[in-house]
Amino acid sequence: MTLTEQIDHDLKEAMKARDAFKLGTLRMLKSALKYSSIEQGGASATLSDGEAVAVIRKQVKQREDSVASFEQGGRPELAEKEKSEIALLKVYLPQGLSEVELEALVKEAIAEVGATSKAQMGAVMKAAQAKAAGRADGRQLSAIVQQLLS
């Protein structure tokens, strides 16, 4: 079962269970997935699991930014709603890499590129992100690259 099929199935289950929160969140996700597929190849296009994961990561990132804005603006109830949506969306993301795995991955990328200073950080980041294949947060990856290149 592909990721989009799983989301469709869970959407139907949320409808049957009359779970308004889950239903609303999954509808927003389905809309984002459909919008992305139309952008990439027209109305009849379908997304691969990798492309769907990228859309879900984008949705999570948007909600994380909203949480920060709501907390800064003194709206904790809206921040909590966004945090709940993030938790629901993360169910569809692949398991992330541990700190140790990330460090090993970055060391491998540094060796591949032959980097010796922070000036080559861009090349290392590109190689590391390709190796991580969407299973690592860019900020976390960047911090490890900076730490190892300094």
Image (cartoon, rainbow, N blue to C red):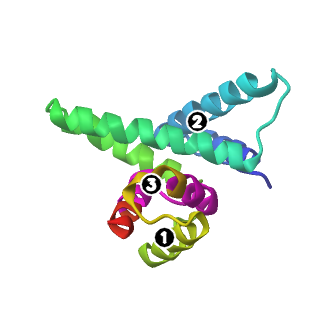
Where residue 85 appears, x then y in whole percent? 43, 43
Residue drawn where x is 19% and y is 32% of the image: 75
Q: Amino acid at mark 3?
A: Met
* Label 2: how many Cα within 10 Å (few below 14, some 14–19, many 20+): many
Of circles 2 and 1, the one toward us is: 1
Circle 1 residue: 102
Where residue 119 appears, x then y in whole percent? 41, 52
Q: Amino acid at mark 2?
A: Leu
Local SS, label 1: helix
In the displayed orientation, state which residue is furthest to the right: 44
Where residue 86 appears, x then y in whole percent? 43, 47
- State the CA–CA distance, disc 3 to disc 2: 33 Å
In magenta segment, residue 142: yes
Circle 3 residue: 121
Q: Residue 105 sits in which quadrant?
A: bottom right
Name the mark on residue 29. 2
The secondary structure that most of the magenta stretch takes on is helix
> Foreground: 1 or 111?
111
Q: Amino acid at mark 1?
A: Leu
Q: Could you tell me if the residues under marks 2 and 1 are in contact, i.e. CB atoms within 8 Å? A: no
- In the rendered view of the protein, which quadrant contains the N terminus? bottom right
The residues colored magenta run 125-143
